[in-house]
Image (spheres, rainbow, N blue to C red):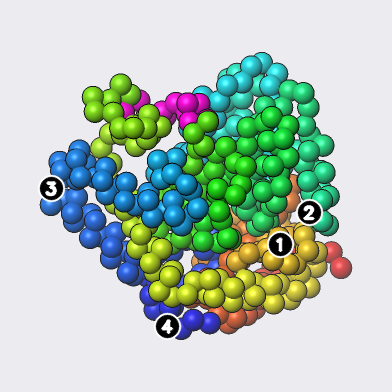
Amino acid sequence: MHTHLKDQFLLRKDITFLNFGSFGATPKPIFDNYQQWQKVLEAEPVQFIAFDGYEYLSTSRKALAEFLAVNDKDDLVYVTNPSFAVNIIAKAFPLNEGDEILATDIEYGACDRTWDYYCAQKKAVYKRQKINLPITTKEQFIEDFFAGITPKTKAVFISHITSATALILPVKEICEIAKSKGLITIVDGAHAPAHVALKINELAADFYVGACHKWMMAPKGASFLYAHKSVQHLCDPLVVSWGYKAAKPSDSTFLDYHQMIGTRDFSAFLTIPTCIAFMQENNWTSVAKQCHETVLANAAQFFQLLGTQPICPLTSEWIGQMISIPIHTKEPELLQRKLFKEYHIEIPIMRQDEDIYMRYSINAFNSVQDLETLHKALTDIMNTTDLITVAR
């Protein structure tokens, strides 16, 4: 598809890599920048960690704020992953006994567990509202979701793009309706930055968490938490350290609490300007569009092969650079390992409660041939094992 870009990635040449969605992949220029920052760290660790690093982080957050359309860079703080950010929000979120957090039943499992844990501590309820699949219209989805609202609902928690089901959800409309009802809005945007057109200042989101190490292609462990100024006081530090009662406080307690958390290598955070520059230099909007078109153009053959149906309209409203195909298998983990070990295909076979999905992602280094390789492998497995069943 983009042969000049394929060589920019460090991925193994013997692997058909169809799982960009899980942890991304970092191009050589970005990885080189990462290692340059690590060398700066090791050349003078004290200055890097205790002094200069805060200016480096500020510069990087400024670039990220502009990229995400966040008005004030100090409303962003870097964290290692979106789950870390959701924990910051959930741990101290003010809930009384019987209060409810409204979510869908297709959220990311780690975040479900986070809310379950903290709600149980406070005797509150994490409510996973049933979403009817297949989705038919945006209006029906919104109606399904808000059917779960009660007088005890205090906040909504929703993915911008879901994990197992790979659905782009109408978070703008959800947040606007929730705010009109006086609710706090929390968006899990792990997959959204550089995957969809994201302008946080146009969303009525109080909190927005996202990954830079997925579709922005940063090194692993680069993510962010956005909190509107009106809710930053709700964010207690997960790690109480020098930022609490800081000897030299910044203008933002939010930053002090969550940025000054002890010794760590934050070099990955500092690569964000290089990530953005790489995308600009390579016309990433066009690259992403072609990848999206490849995702949709090749989906039908997999639904036909596996004897399943799409879980949403196959349009850009719901689908980006990855798609989830329902698959019938009693042993998804075994199937995933077989595809990797025997066919050298990296692709997730994911559980979502009782349902199972095969999710393929397409990025600049992929080609239609990669999907043909997947199709042949699945056909072979279906012809030689009983791992996949098909209801005709």
Numbered disc 3: secondary structure: loop
Is 233 included in the stretch rendered in magenta?
A: yes
Q: Based on the displayed image, in which of its 4 quarters is residue 273 positioned?
A: bottom left
Q: Label 2: which residue?
A: 138
The Cα atoms of the two marked residues, 3 and 4, are separated by 37 Å
Q: Which mark is residue 4?
A: 4
The Cα atoms of the two marked residues, 1 and 4, are separated by 29 Å
For the stretch drawn in magenta, the main secondary structure is loop
Q: Which mark is residue 44?
A: 3
User: First in sequence: mark 1 or mark 3?
Assistant: 3
Q: Is residue 216 left or right of residue 53?
A: right
Q: Amino acid at mark 3?
A: Glu
Examine the rendering and report whether any part of residue 51 can be seen. yes
* Picture residue at 39% right of the left edge, 63% below the top: 275
Q: Is residue 279 above or below residue 163?
A: below
> Is 123 or 71 nearer to us in this picture?
71
**Where residue 52 appears, x then y in whole percent?**
20, 45
The Cα atoms of the two marked residues, 1 and 3, are separated by 48 Å
How crowded is the residue under tag 4: few (<14 C-alpha within 10 Å), some, or many (20+)?
A: few
Q: Amino acid at mark 4?
A: His
Q: Residue furthest front?
A: 71
Q: Amino acid at mark 2?
A: Lys
Q: Report if the CB atoms under discs 1 and 3 are less than 8 Å apart.
A: no
The Cα atoms of the two marked residues, 3 and 2, are separated by 53 Å
**Where residue 203 appears, x then y in whole percent?**
61, 47
Is 256 included in the stretch rendered in magenta?
A: no
**Where residue 365 appears, x then y in whole percent?**
48, 75
- Magenta residues span 231-243
**1 vs 3, front mark:** 1
User: First in sequence: mark 1 or mark 2?
Assistant: 2
Q: Label 1: which residue?
A: 317
